[in-house]
Amino acid sequence: MEREAKEILKSIHSHNKAFGGHFIEITAGTGKGKTAMLLSTASYNLEHFPDERTFFSECFDTPIQVLKLGIDVVHILIPEKNKDDITFRDRDKALKLVPHDFFNVSYYKDFQDLYERAVPGKINVPFFIDRRDVMEFIAHLRSIGTFNTFLIDEMSEIATSMGHNMYRRNENFAFTCKDLRKCLCNVWYTAQNTSQVDWRVRSAIDIKIFGPASKADKHSRITQKAIDNLVVNKKTGNEYWISDGGVFGLFRLGDVYEPKEGLNIEAHCRAIPTN
Ligand SMILES: Nc1ncnc2c1ncn2[C@@H]1O[C@H](COP(=O)(O)OP(=O)(O)O)[C@@H](O)[C@H]1O
Ligand SMILES: [Mg+2]
């Protein structure tokens, strides 16, 4: 790993009050290890920060990614009043219903209750009826004062540049994200195509990670040619560029995650968001 990449990763992983929180974007093509990077961060936290809360926002209608780390480390949080709207189904068994209590599960009443029920040393996976509520949840937690980590898979489903009535919510979230450094929160997100993420939210990013098949960005020093030369290898792990303003470096993600036998389970939400 290049020294610059090591320094940048160290500043993110130190969870140091003096450095504060970071807002990190990971872009890469399909199947190029974006989610793997979040899983790697989650397991790093479990090992090094067992007293802190780590959250992972999962997509609906696709297998739950954190199960690749095993079911024991996963804690699922479901809104109490919409208990019946969140369901789980097994992809390997013709989408047979999986009862909630197959998992380590809690039911929450409101945002504060969700935070308090989240278990330090586990990967907390909160579900919302409207997945985009994660934006207001992060805003709610700005005042907590201890380190928290949020891992958001597929940001285009959250701060979406394409949604109706999202202008104000995305703008408020952009303000939250600008403040992450001071409120001791690391937020990492993945996106395949950054044009699907609200530009005001993107303008709050301080660290960018470019994986194979990503697009160069006019605000960073990493060229398209450098991205196109990234090594892709399913055994030893893919290479990525990481950039913090003008400082950038190359690293390889050696953690390669594969689906776990018997845990190919999807989450579904029956209620349809209204905005
Ligand atoms: N660090 C890695 N380097 C190379 N291949 C990986 C890595 N992590 C996972 N993979 C492989 O690539 C597949 C897709 O990884 P995933 O993280 O889901 O990609 P993405 O989220 O970018 O679509 C995994 O199922 C695994 O086989
Ligand atoms: Mg993914």
Image (cartoon, helix red, strand yellow):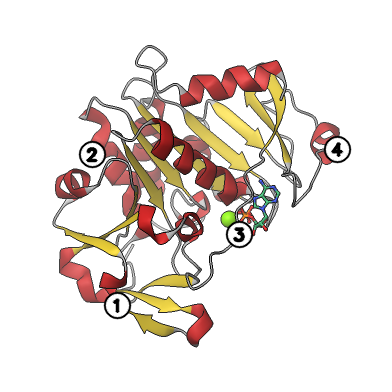
Of the four image quadrants, the one with ligand 2 is bottom right
For discs 2 and 4, the disc positioned in front in the rendered view: 4
The residue indicated by pointer 3 is 258
Q: Is mark 3 within 8 Å of ligand 1?
A: yes
Quarter holding the N terminus is top right
Which badge, 1 or 2, comes first in the chain's sequence?
A: 1
Q: Can you see residue 161?
A: no
The residue indicated by pointer 1 is 99
Rounded to the nearest angstrom, the CA distance separating label 2 from label 3 is: 34 Å
Q: Are marks 3 and 4 in contact (CB under 8 Å)?
A: no
The residue indicated by pointer 2 is 140
Residue 248 against residue 110 in the figure, above or below:
above
Rounded to the nearest angstrom, the CA distance separating label 1 from label 2 is: 30 Å
**Where does residue 254 sit, x and y in percent of width and height?**
67, 41
Rounded to the nearest angstrom, the CA distance separating label 3 from label 4 is: 25 Å
Residue 34 against residue 264 in the figure, above or below:
above
Secondary structure, mark 3, is loop
Secondary structure, mark 1, is loop
| Crowding at mark 4 (Cα within 10 Å: few <14, some 14-19, many 20+) | few
Q: Which mark is residue 229?
A: 4
Which badge, 2 or 4, comes first in the chain's sequence?
A: 2
Which badge, 2 or 3, comes first in the chain's sequence?
A: 2
| Crowding at mark 3 (Cα within 10 Å: few <14, some 14-19, many 20+) | few
In the rendered structure, the answer to whether residue 252 lies left or right of residue 72 reads right
Secondary structure, mark 4, is loop
Name the kind of residue labelled 4 in the image: Asn
